[in-house]
Image: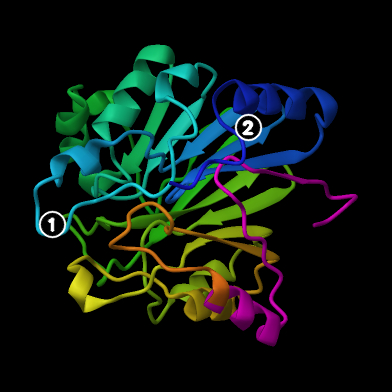
Amino acid sequence: MIQPLQSDEVLLADIQAAARQQPNALHLWWLGQSGYLVQWQGQHLLLDPYLSDTLTRKYANAPKPHIRMTALPIAPQRLDFIDVVTSSHNHTDHLDGATLGPLLQANPKLTIVTAAANQRFAAERLQVVPERLTAITLATPITVGAFTLHAIPAAHEALEQDEQGHYRCIGLIVEAGPWTLYHSGDTVRYATMVDRLRRWSIDVAFLPINGHDPQRGVAANLAGPEAAQLGRDAGIGLVIPCHYDMFTFNTVAPDAFVQATTMLGQPQRVLQCGERLSLSKESPP
């Protein structure tokens, strides 16, 4: 099993040290799959965390067991300083009751942001009233402390909308001070995607690279070269790959992504689980 670069007490100490040693930098940690911790000026945002073995237990006796590849970097209940957490869509590795429930207990004032189309489903999974969750739509950005979130559509595999026209899968543009981040959620490229992204000057994008193998029996994502091309076409400053090294049946190596970014001249950074990336406007990556 892959061991996180930092976990448990070491990871917590690094989170505390980052705020203390570089208070004016933006700090990011990859927590596995599509989960990221973002720290800006002492406030903390969790993007699509999956910090349990829910799927491994659920599919233990299934034809395609979800065998975990990377050890858990930290238990969710230990993250008792989170201000806002997001869920891009209803798949369990992006909306996990065993992750979000303990997070909510550890952070009673936690803001939980879900796509408006998924608010009721998410509330049932978390066993809370729908009003406890903060629904986001394309027309209504949400500000929580230091973070402003804007929703854009995601296509996993197609663009799907509910009866009110709200998208069932979303990505998020995150504004934090001078920084703009893009967390795509699970998605493939669609016709208007680049035009939507170019409305912002995106410093960092978190993009899936596991692609689509029909034999896996799961919805498609960007492949590594597609993520590299999207970053280039959308003018993104730095692309960080994700959605791999979690389950043995649904993973790829980042090599093709790295090769494609090199050919395109697209800046990238491959993180290890539990690794920190600190960004300063004075000292770009």
Under tag 1, what secondary structure? loop
Q: Is residue 176 above or below residue 191?
A: above
Count all numbered tags in the image, as a single digit.
Answer: 2
Q: Which mark is residue 163?
A: 1
Residue at position x 66%, y 74% in the image: 235
Residue type at the position of mark 1: Glu
- Identify whether 5 is placed above or below 23: below
Using residue 101 as the reference point, say whether residue 125 is left or right of it.
Answer: left
To which residue does mark 2 refer? 146
Determine which quarter of the picture holds residue 257: bottom right
Magenta residues, start to end: 256-285
On the question of residue 116 being in view, the answer is: yes
Residue 39, x across and y down, in percent? 64, 34
Is 223 included in the stretch rendered in magenta?
no
Quarter of the figure with the C terminus:
bottom right
| x 33%, y 30%: residue | 99
- Secondary structure found at label 2: loop
The amino acid type of the residue labelled 2 equals Ala
